Image: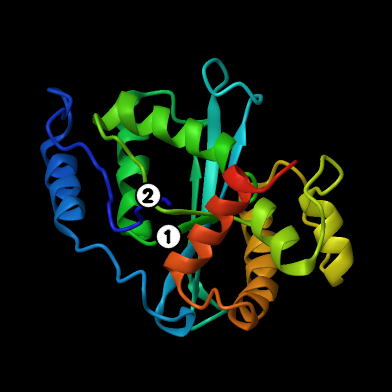
C-alpha cells in the first residue's frame, strides 16, 4: 500500500539563476509541515486542480495553464481560496518560475484532487523539475477511480467527468477552461466526500489509499 506519510520533494537542485526572492519562498514552502492525513475530512484541506495543455503527451506538449480550488470543512468552497495560472502568455522562464512558486504557496502541502491523475501529475512534475529543480510528488486523490468505487460503477472509457456531471445534475463547465473545470471537479468532490465517509474512507489517507488500491489492484480496472 502506498505510504502516504512520505512527501518526497527534492531540495538540492535549485537552478543557479533562480530569483533570490523565489528561492526564499521555495525554502519556506519546503519547511511547511505536511498535513495530518489521518484527520477527518471536516478538518482537512483539499486542493482541486485542473490543467490546460496543448495535447495529452506530457513529454512533448506544453502546459498552458492550471487552476486550483480549495475545498475545506468537508466540502465548503471559499471564494478567496482559488488560484488561476496562465502560462500561454508567459514565455519567459522567470515569469513561469513566479507562477509556479505562487501555485506552491497556495497549495501548501495539501492533498491534490483531479480527474485522472496521471496526465496532470506528469505535466506538473515536469514543469516543477525543469523550472525549480523540484521533485513535486504530492498526495493525489483521483476522482476517476473513487467515483466508480463509491457509486458502484465499473471503470471504463465511458466514465468521463461529463458523465458524472450529468449523473449528479451538475452543469458541465466549458471545456479547456481550467478554473471552470476545477470548480466542476470541486463539486464532484463535494458529492464524493459524504459517500466516502459512509464507506469508511473518512480521512485523506483512507481516501487516497482507496483510489490507489482501486487503480492498481482491482481486477479488470
Q: Is residue 46 above or below residue 139?
A: below
Q: Is residue 221 visible?
A: no
Element assignment for label 2: loop
**Circle 1: element type:** loop
Q: Tell me the residue at 77%/48% (across/down).
A: 155
Q: Residues within 10 Å of mark 1 (few under 14, many from 20)?
A: many
Residue under the image location 24 percent in, 29 percent down:
133
x%, y% of residue 20? 11, 38
**Of the image marks 2 and 1, the number of the one nearer the N terminus:** 1
Which of the 4 quarters of the picture holds residue 22?
Answer: top left
Disc on res. 138? 2
Image height of 151 relative to 114, above or below:
below
Circle 1 sits on which residue? 111
Q: Position of residue 218 (x, y in %)?
A: 66, 48
> In the depicted view, which residue is nearer to us: 180 or 144?
144
Query: Which residue occupies the foreground of this view, 194 or 76?
Result: 194
Lateral position of residue 175 relative to residue 100, left or right:
right
- Label 2: how many residues lie within 10 Å, few (<14), some (14-19) or many (20+)? some
Say how the picture is coloured.
rainbow
Q: Mark 2 and 1 residues: CB-CB less than 8 Å, in contact?
A: yes
| Residue at 26 percent of width and 44 percent of height | 8
In which quadrant is the C terminus drawn?
top right
Residue 100 or 40: which is nearer the viewer?
A: 40
Relative horizontal placement of residue 194, taking residue 138 as reference (left or right)? right
Q: Residue at x 36, y 24 (%)?
A: 92
* Horizontal relation, residue 207 to residue 33: left or right: right
Q: Position of residue 89 (x, y in %)?
A: 51, 31
Residue 47 makes an appearance in the image? yes
Residue 111 drawn at (x, y percent): 42, 60
Picture layout, residue 63 above or below residue 72: above
Amino acid at each position: 500500500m502506498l505510504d502516504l506519510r512520505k512527501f518526497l520533494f527534492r531540495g538540492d537542485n535549485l537552478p543557479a539563476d533562480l530569483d533570490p526572492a523565489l528561492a526564499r519562498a521555495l525554502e519556506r514552502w519546503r519547511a511547511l509541515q505536511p498535513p495530518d492525513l489521518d484527520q477527518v475530512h471536516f478538518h482537512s484541506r483539499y486542493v482541486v486542480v485542473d490543467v490546460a495543455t496543448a495535447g495529452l503527451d506530457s513529454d512533448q506538449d506544453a502546459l498552458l495553464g492550471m487552476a486550483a480550488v480549495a475545498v475545506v470543512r468537508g466540502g465548503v468552497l471559499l471564494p478567496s481560496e482559488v488560484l488561476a495560472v496562465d502560462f500561454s502568455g508567459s514565455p519567459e522562464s522567470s515569469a513561469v518560475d513566479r507562477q509556479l512558486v505562487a501555485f506552491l504557496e497556495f497549495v501548501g502541502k495539501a492533498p491534490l484532487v483531479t480527474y485522472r491523475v496521471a496526465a496532470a501529475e506528469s505535466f506538473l512534475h515536469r514543469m516543477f523539475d525543469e523550472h525549480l529543480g523540484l521533485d513535486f510528488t504530492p498526495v493525489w486523490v483521483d476522482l476517476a477511480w473513487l467515483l466508480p468505487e463509491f457509486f458502484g460503477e465499473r471503470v471504463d472509457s465511458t466514465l468521463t467527468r461529463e458523465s458524472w456531471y450529468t449523473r449528479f445534475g451538475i452543469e458541465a463547465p466549458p471545456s479547456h477552461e481550467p478554473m471552470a473545470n476545477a470548480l466542476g471537479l470541486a463539486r464532484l468532490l463535494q458529492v464524493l466526500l459524504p459517500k466516502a465517509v459512509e464507506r469508511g474512507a473518512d480521512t485523506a489517507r483512507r481516501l487516497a489509499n482507496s483510489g490507489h488500491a482501486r487503480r492498481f489492484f482491482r481486477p479488470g480496472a
